[in-house]
Image (spheres, rainbow, N blue to C red):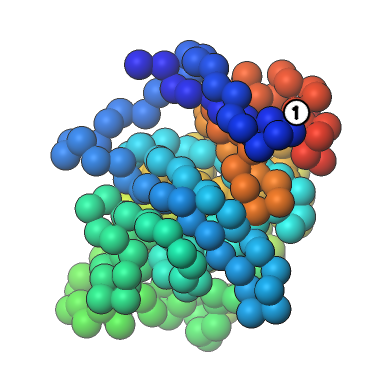
Amino acid sequence: MSPIVHRETHDGSLEVSSRELAQPAAPSKDGRPALQVRQLDFSYPDGHTALRNVSLQVQRGEKIALVGPNGAGKSTLMLHLNGILRGEGEIFVGELPVVEANLPAVRARVGLVFQNPDDQLFSPTVFEDVAFGPLHLGLPEEEVRQRVANALEQVNMRAYGERLSHHLSLGEKKRIAIATVLSMEPEILVLDEPSSGLDPRARRGLIELLDQLPLTILAATHDMPMVRDLFHRMVIMDGGAIIADGPTEALLSDAALLEAHGLEAP
């Protein structure tokens, strides 16, 4: 079945068309999506409505770019995916509803990587940062060491275990921040502006890393060349709502749509 491209028109209705996706994700073994968001609404305590009627379905193995202007609701949506924020609506990670009783299990499945790696790196050494999550799961020491080694291997930083985290470059810190999440062996990786602040070499290395990871990935980004190169599906948000959702190539070719929502084709 072809994926659906939908966009919100000026009168609030949905315009729907069918397009072929170049490389569709394999369905999950149990037939369930990796992630479902259903009619999610959220307002901050000051009354600002950050999300309105957001619905999103992500299949296992998909890599999806979440794009839109500042204040569109991208980061707010991501903070709902493992229960840091709680709005009105439903969210399922696999078969698990994101409710209070399930938060430990949900947070083990959904790994969130913040824009600023210093928000995640607070231990003296890289090894201790990457080991922090598995240790707090109560895992045996040998399993913790194996998870740390595996995570650092996945981000090509295995030799950095004894390095001081605060002495690393920004690109190195971002890789280690991803490793802190990978050590929890998540099913879904959620990243906020992963390429922000990186020089061209570090940025290209990050794109190659994300491309190789065998995980479902949802990334909020303003880096449209990265969106074109890495993500086969793109979701445009503006004003707290999903405006369009479909194959990246198709949406990037719609200049009027991009301009209307503060975006530019790469």
Residue 31 locus on image (x, y percent):
20, 36
Label tally: 1
Q: Position of residue 24 (x, y in %)?
A: 40, 23
Q: Is residue 22 visible?
A: no
When asked about the image quadrant of residue 45, the answer is: bottom right
Indicate whether 6 appears above or below 114: above
**Residue 176 vs residue 49: left or right?**
left
Crowdedness near tag 1: few (<14), some (14–19) or many (≥20) residues, C-alpha within 10 Å:
some
Judging depth in this view, the residue of 257 and 27 nearest the camera is 257
Q: Nearer the viewer, residue 111 or 208?
A: 111
Which of the image's four quarters has the C terminus? top right
Give the residue displayed 22% in from the left and 53% down from the top. 95
Query: Height in image: 13 above or below 67?
Result: above
The local secondary structure at tag 1 comes to: helix
Compared to residue 264, the image places residue 201 above or below, namely below
Q: Residue at x 59, y 30 (%)?
A: 14
User: Percent x, y for residue 237?
Assistant: 65, 45
Q: Where is residue 192 drawn, in percent x and y? A: 60, 57
Residue at the (32%, 55%) spot, across then down: 92
The residue type indicated by label 1 comes to: Leu
Q: Which residue is mark 1?
A: 257
For residue 253, what is the image quadrant?
A: top right
Residue at the front extreme of this rendering = 11
Quadrant in the picture for the N terminus: top left
Q: Is residue 208 left or right of residue 12?
A: left
Q: Residue at x 37, y 48 (%)?
A: 36
